[in-house]
C-alpha cells in the first residue's frame, strides 16, 4: 500500500522501488559457520543491485529461486563452499522459536567493502520462511529517484501524502552515535503505520558514551588491505 501511495503521488519522479527484508542469523556449512546479515530481495526487481554486484561464480538470476543464497568471496572461503553447495541458516523467530532453513549457493560475488563483510542475500520468501513471517510482510521500502537532488523535497511531500492516506507518520533526523553506531553521520528516519502512532525510541548514548570505531572493531586481528584472517 505504501508503494502504491508513493507511485501515485510521484509517477514522474520515481525510478523504481524495492522492498527488502532484513535479518541476522548463524550460517552453517559442513566445516564452519559465521554470523551473517541477511537481505531478503526480489532479484527480478533490483536493477541497481545488479550494477553493484560483480558475480565471480554462478548466476545471479538463480537468486529468484526459493532456497538460494548469494555469498561474497571471503564468506565462501570462510565457510569452505562453492556454487551448488548447501548451507543452513539458524535463527530465532519473533515468537522466540528456533528455526532453520536450508539454502543452496547459486552465486559468489566479488567483495565490495563493508557490504560484503556482513551481508548475504536470499529471496524474500526464504527470509520469510526462516522467521515464520506472513507472505505480505516487508522490511524497508527503498525509493530510488530519477533525480536524487530532489530527495529532500520528495521526502517532505511523501510525509504529507502518507498522512492524507491515513498513516500515522513520524520522522526525525537522528545522530548515529546516539544509537551505538560508530559513524559520525546523521540519518533521516521515517516511520509510518496504519494502526497506531509510531515513533523511534530516543538514543541510549550521550557524548560521554559514544562508541568509537576502535572500540567496535579494535579487538579484531590487524590485516593488510585485502587480507584475510581464517580464524
Image: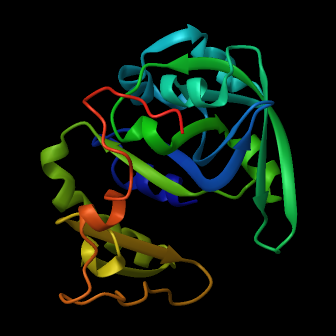
Q: Residue furthest left?
A: 149
Q: Position of residue 218 (x, y in %)?
A: 31, 58
Q: Is residue 23 above or below residue 80?
A: below
Query: Could you tell whether 49 is left or right of 173 in the image?
Result: right
Seen from the viewer's position, the closer of residues 107 and 29 is 29
Closer-to-camera residue (59/180) = 180
Q: Can you say whether 172 is above or below 94 in the image? A: below
At which x and y percent is residue 68? 73, 28
Q: How many marks?
A: 0
Instruction: State left or right for residue 38 relative to residue 147.
Output: right
**Is residue 28 positioned above or below 48 on the image?**
below
Q: Which quarter of the picture shows residue 204?
A: bottom left
Residue 182 makes an appearance in the image: no
- Residue at 40 percent across and 39 percent down: it is 115
Q: How is the image coloured?
A: rainbow
- Which residue does the image show at 17% across and 60% down from the upper left? 153
Residue sitting at x 27%, y 71%: 176
* Screen quadrant of the N terminus: bottom right
Figure quadrant of residue 170: bottom left
In the rendered image, the vertical position of residue 118 relative to residue 53, given as above or below: below
Residue at 75% over, 24% down: 65
Q: Can residue 155 be seen at all in this image of the molecule?
A: yes
Q: Position of residue 116 (x, y in %)?
A: 44, 35
**In this rendering, position of residue 113 left or right of residue 39:** left
Q: Quadrant of residue 121?
A: top right
The C terminus: image quadrant: top right
Residue 106 position in % (x across, y down):
68, 18
Amino acid at each position: 500500500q505504501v508503494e502504491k501511495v508513493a507511485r501515485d503521488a510521484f509517477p514522474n519522479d520515481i525510478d523504481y522501488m524495492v522492498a527488502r527484508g532484513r535479518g541476522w542469523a548463524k550460517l552453517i556449512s559442513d566445516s564452519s559457520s559465521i554470523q551473517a546479515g541477511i537481505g531478503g530481495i526480489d532479484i527480478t526487481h533490483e536493477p541497481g543491485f545488479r550494477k553493484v554486484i560483480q558475480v565471480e561464480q554462478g548466476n545471479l538470476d538463480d537468486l529468484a529461486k526459493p532456497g538460494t543464497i548469494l555469498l561474497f568471496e571471503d564468506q565462501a572461503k570462510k565457510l569452505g563452499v562453492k556454487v551448488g553447495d548447501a548451507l543452513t541458516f539458524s535463527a530465532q523467530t519473533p515468537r522466540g522459536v528456533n528455526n532453520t532453513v536450508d539454502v543452496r549457493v547459486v552465486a559468489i560475488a566479488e567483495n565490495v567493502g563493508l557490504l560484503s563483510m556482513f551481508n548475504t542475500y536470499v529471496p524474500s520468501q526464504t527470509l520469510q520462511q526462516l522467521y515464520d513471517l506472513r507472505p505480505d510482510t516487508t522490511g524497508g521500502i527503498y525509493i530510488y529517484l530519477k533525480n536524487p537532488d530532489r530527495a529532500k523535497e520528495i521526502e517532505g511531500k511523501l510525509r504529507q501524502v502518507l498522512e492524507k492516506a491515513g498513516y500515522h507518520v513520524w520522522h526525525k533526523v537522528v545522530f548515529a552515535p546516539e544509537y551505538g553506531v560508530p559513524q559520525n553521520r546523521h540519518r533521516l528516519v521515517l516511520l509510518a503505520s496504519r494502526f497506531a502512532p509510531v515513533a523511534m525510541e530516543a538514543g541510549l548514548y550521550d557524548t560521554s558514551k559514544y562508541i568509537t570505531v576502535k572500540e567496535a572493531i579494535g579487538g579484531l586481528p590487524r590485516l593488510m588491505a585485502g587480507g584475510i584472517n581464517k580464524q
